[in-house]
Image (spheres, rainbow, N blue to C red):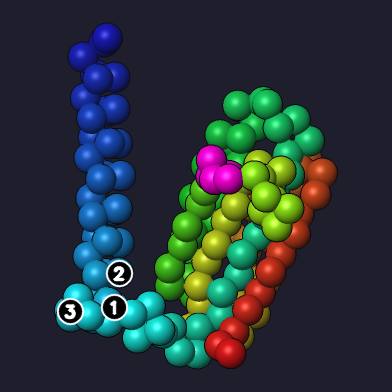
């Protein structure tokens, strides 16, 4: 490999690792210290969860999938986003209630509805839709708040 490219790849991987490490540390700060606490003991009070599922027009086109994931990562620059996850269908058991048919999932959390409202009109979000909507043929959004 060309030395300059190798260095750039290592730098990119290091930045990615540092970002993930920082996110993990931040998430760990939200979790209780005791091992005896159940999932019910960890609550995201007041949080609005915005979960988006994308079905690509060409689900086997790796370039399109990569473009969407890169664009979603850029979308994470919206300042009202507090936590995020971008993923692919897990290889979990096939059951009637499990849908593995989507191509990419995108989940972000906001402090409240006002944060999500601001996200919807943020120029970064508007640009994301304009530049990438040609990639998908279906999008489903689930927004939820505390029960």
| Location of the N terminus (image quadrant) | top left
Residue visible at 27% across and 77% down in the picture? 31
**Disc on res. 30:** 1
Q: Tell me the distance, in whole angstroms, between the alpha carbons under discs 3 and 2.
A: 12 Å
Q: Is residue 112 visible?
A: no
Q: Which residue is mark 3?
A: 33
Which residue in the rendered view is the most extreme toward the right?
137
- Circle nearer the N terminus (3, 2): 2
Give the quarter of the image for residue 24.
Answer: bottom left
Q: Position of residue 5 (x, y in %)?
A: 29, 19
- The answer to whether mark 1 and mark 2 are in CB contact below 8 A is yes
- Across and down, in percent, residue 117 comes to 65, 80
Kindly indicate the quadrant of the structure image that contains residue 39: bottom left
Q: How far is disc 1 from disc 3 in space, using C-alphas? A: 9 Å
Residue that carries the numbered disc 2 in the rendered image: 27
Residue at point 59% right, 84% down? 145
> Which percent across, then down, holds residue 60?
68, 26
């Amino acid at each position: 490999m060309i030395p300059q490219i190798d260095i750039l790849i290592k730098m990119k991987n290091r930045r990615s690792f540092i970002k993930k490490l920082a996110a993990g540390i931040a998430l760990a700060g939200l979790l209780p210290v005791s091992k005896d606490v159940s999932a019910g003991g960890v609550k995201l009070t007041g949080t609005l969860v915005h979960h988006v599922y994308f079905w690509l027009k060409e689900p086997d086109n790796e370039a399109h999938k990569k473009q969407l994931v890169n664009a979603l990562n850029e979308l994470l620059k919206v300042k009202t986003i507090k936590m995020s996850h971008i993923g692919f269908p897990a290889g979990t058991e096939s059951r009637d209630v499990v849908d593995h048919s989507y191509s990419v999932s995108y989940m972000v959390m906001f402090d409240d509805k006002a944060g999500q409202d601001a996200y919807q009109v943020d120029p970064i979000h508007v640009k994301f839709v304009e530049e990438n909507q040609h990639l998908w043929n279906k999008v489903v959004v689930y927004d939820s708040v505390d029960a």
